[in-house]
Image (cartoon, rainbow, N blue to C red):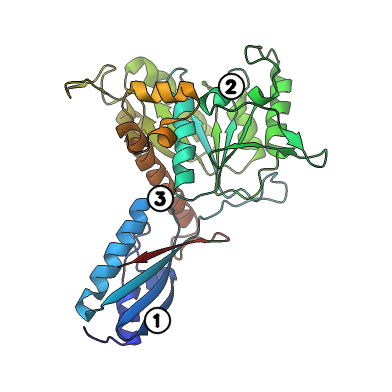
Amino acid sequence: MGSPTLEAVTKALRQVEDPIFRKPLGELGTLLDVRVEDGRVWTKIKVSSPSEEVRNTIRKRVDEALEPLEVGFIEVELTVDVPTRETTSTDPIPDVRNVILVMSGKGGVGKSTVATNLALALRRLGSRVGLLDADIYGPSLPTMLGIEGHPTSKDGKRIQPLQRFGIKLMSIGFLLEDAKQAVVWRGPMLHGALQQFVNDVDWGGLDYLVLDLPPGTGDVALTLAQRLRITGAIIVTTPQEVAIQDVYKSVSMCQKLNIPILGVVENMSYFVDSAGVTHELFGRGGGQRIAEFAEAPLFGQVPLDPEVREWGDRGTPVVQAAPSSTSAQAFVRIADALAERVAHEHFERGGGETAPEGEGPKRLRILR
C-alpha cells in the first residue's frame, strides 16, 4: 500500500462533489477535517441531510477520489447538520428547524397514512421528529399510532407531548374523553386549538415537525401560514382524475400563501396481486400531473397494500412494523427525497454558495 501525503489526500477530498448541492466539498466548506497516518485516512464531512442515499453516495465518492492514492484504510465521519428555517422573534417554536405540511385538497387519499409513515421514516434516519395532527374534526393519529392518554404539564404553562416510537405527538384526540366524541366547534375555537398546539406544546428541539392537515383549502393552512415560517408542503394525491381536480386547489392555495411545495406523493398508485401482476386500479399519471402543475418533484409512488391498512389499524404503521416491505421502503425513499429537498431549498434560498447551517450535528462513522 502507498503512503499518501496529507496534502494529496486533502486535495482529492476537496474535489468530492456533494450529491445534494452538486458542488465540491472544498467549495462548500463541508470538508471539516482530514488526517493521514501510515497510509490510513480519517476524514470528517458535513452533510445537510440524514438521507441514507446521501451517506452512501458520499462514501462511494470518497473511495473513488482516494483510489488512485492507494489508501489502505479509510474512516469517514459524517456529521448530519439539518439546516434550519429562518425564524422571527415572534416565532412560537424557534427550536424546530423545519415545519413540513402534509396536505391535500381531497379526503380519502391517505394523507394521514403518508404523514405518519413519513415521520417514522425520518425518525429511523436518526432525526428528531414531531407529528402534529392538525385535523381537529377528524383526528386519526391516536388510532394509527396506537396511543392513548392525556398530555400533562410540568409547570402549568407548557403541555408535554405524548411520545411513541421516539416521535413527539399531539392531537385533539388526546384531549377527548371518548374517541367517538364529535368536535363541534366554530372557526375561532379551531384557531384557538391550533395556536395552543403550536404555542403551548413543549416541542423542544426538532429537526422536522410534520403537520397532518385536514382535507380542503380551509382555515387551518391559512392560520399556520400566518403563525409560522413554514419550510414547505408535501402534496398527497391518488392517480384518478376526481382526486387530482381537488388537489390542484391545494397547490393553488400554497402558491397564494407563499408556501413552498417541496414535492408530491402519489398514494395507492398500483396493486400487485398474489400472482405478481400489477393493477393500476385508479388509473395512472395523477401524481406526475400534480407535480408538473406544482413545478415540484414527484417524491414517490406508494402501492395500494392491505398491509399498510392492517398495520395502521393495529396502531403500528408499516414503516415501524414491516420496514423491509415494499410499502415501507416506498415511504423511506420519500423521506430521503424530502430531507434532500429541504436541504437543497435552504441552499438555494441562502444564495447557493456555502452549505446551509444547522445546529448540533449528529455523527455517523463509516469504515472501509
Q: CA distance from mark 1 to mark 3?
A: 28 Å
Question: Looking at numbered disc 1 in the image, what kind of residue is underneath it?
Answer: Arg
Is residue 200 among the parts visible in the rendering? no
Which residue position is annotated with label 1?
35
Which residue position is annotated with label 2?
139
> At 40% from the left edge and 38% from the top edge, which residue is drawn?
263
- Front position among marks 1 and 3: 1
Asked if the residues shown at circle 3 and circle 2 are in contact, with their CB atoms under 8 angstroms apart, the answer is: no
Q: CA distance from mark 1 to mark 2?
A: 53 Å
Question: Is the residue 42 above or below the residue 94 in the image?
Answer: below
Quarter of the picture holding the N terminus: bottom left
Q: Which mark is residue 296?
A: none
Most extreme residue toward the right, as rendered?
156
Choose the circle earlier in sequence order: 1 or 2: 1
Choose the circle earlier in sequence order: 3 or 2: 2
Residue 304 rendering spot, x and y as whole percentages:
32, 23
Which residue position is annotated with label 3?
340
Question: Looking at numbered disc 3 in the image, what kind of residue is underneath it?
Answer: Glu
Count neighbours of disc 2 (C-alpha within 10 A) and say few if under 14, some if 14 to 19, many if 20 or more: many
Tag 1 secondary structure: strand
Image quadrant where residue 301 sits: top left
Question: Is the residue 223 above or below the residue 190 in the image?
Answer: below
Question: Looking at numbered disc 2 in the image, what kind of residue is underneath it?
Answer: Pro
Choose the circle earlier in sequence order: 1 or 3: 1
Residue 307 rendering spot, x and y as whole percentages:
36, 24
Residue 68 rendering spot, x and y as whole percentages:
20, 78
From the viewer's perspective, is 339 left or right of 129? left
Question: Is the residue 314 above or below the residue 20 in the image?
Answer: above
> At 22% from the left edge and 74% from the top edge, which residue is drawn?
67
Tag 2 secondary structure: loop
| Along the viewing direction, whichever of 24 and 325 lies nearer the viewer | 325
Residue 339 rendering spot, x and y as whole percentages:
44, 48
